[in-house]
Amino acid sequence: MTKNNICELLSIKYPIIQAGMVWVSGAKLAAASANAGILGVVGAGSMSPELLDLHLKKANLLTGNKKNLAVNVPLLYSKTKEQLEVSLNNGIRIFITSAGSPKTYTSWLKDQGAIVIHATSSPELALKCENAGVDAVIAEGFEAGGHNGRDEISTFALIPQVVDALSIPVIAAGGIADARGMAAALILGASAVQMGTRFVNTIESSAHQNFKEAILKASPSETMLMMKKYVPVRLLKNTFYDEIKNLEDQCATQEDLIKHLGHGRAKKGMLEGDLVHGELEIGQIAGMIKDIPSVHDLVHQIINDYSKLTLSKF
């Protein structure tokens, strides 16, 4: 495999996207990913426009591959437009949008010379993304960590259906952490993969060491999709998870779940390392992660293993 449409579209060496996760994907992780030849993504979901500006300036200083930097911007926040403008002012021309209609900003961003990728969870929604003019879609199965689609379509059921429905490139996400998962996704028709959970457990990730160590100890059954009445989110099991489960077992209302969730729960767990009361968003693939490598070593290992599996090179 010497040519790849996502690699050509994004000017990256390898068809891997480091997911832009809240509290985890800051300047260090994005820059290290860009330096390794993949798309490095700053996760704006947990950042004010001012903090995003600082991270982008730092990322630009840390990488010689500035064109391989992107920003993930959830569209549900009041300051989304400011985040987009800050990103453009810092030279970002690749945007991954999510959690909102792709019609909202796609045309405007493309008028600024940007490439737009939208994350979605079903073939029907993916087709709406294509009709909105995006350049590619990320089709994310419900194995993924963090917030998920309500349809609960698994990744390897989702990918071929989205590929069959669209004429633009499809990026597979959810439950992919090594060369085997990447090879399977590409065989199913995806042009690239996005990995989130695997990059949480890297040296450059902003995740607290307590969180990284908890992932190393996680068993294959230690995550669960919760809060379906509010916004579905896959969590690592802890006391907070138990509390949410008890509420849901008692048929708690959406208002009850929101009240218990409160504010800053994900920050408490993922960034500050509270493994008891924090919200620990992580993917189902956590059970197979047993190390905390540098981004460089991780990408090198994945590509090396992929070449051995498929006898193909990018």
Image (cartoon, rainbow, N blue to C red):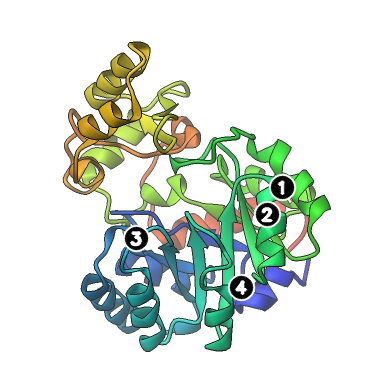
Q: Disc 2 vs disc 1: Cβ atoms closer than 8 Å? A: yes
Q: Secondary structure at mark 1?
A: helix
Residue at screen point 57% across, 72% down: 116
The three-letter amino acid code for the residue at tag 2 is Ala
Q: Label 3 vs label 2: CA separation?
A: 22 Å
Image marks 3 and 1: residues in contact by CB distance under 8 Å: no
Cα–Cα gap, marks 2 and 1: 5 Å
Secondary structure category for the residue under label 2: helix
Q: Secondary structure at mark 4?
A: loop
Which quarter of the image is occupied by the N terminus?
Answer: bottom right
Q: Is residue 214 visible?
A: yes
For residue 223, which quarter of the picture?
top left
Say left or right for 303 vs 307: left
Residue 259 versus residue 314 in the image, above or below: above
Residue receiving disc 2: 126
For label 3, the crowd category at 10 Å Cα-Cα, with few meaning under 14, some 14 to 19 and many 20 or more, is few
Label 3, on which residue? 77
Marks 4 and 2 in Cβ contact (< 8 Å): no
First of labels 3, 4 by sequence position: 4
Residue 72, percent from left and from top: 44, 64
Q: Earlier in the sequence, mark 3 or mark 2?
A: 3
In front of the other: label 3 or label 2?
3
From the top left corner, tell me how far across and down residue 156 is, in percent: 70, 38
Pointer 3 and pointer 2: residues touching (CB < 8 Å)?
no
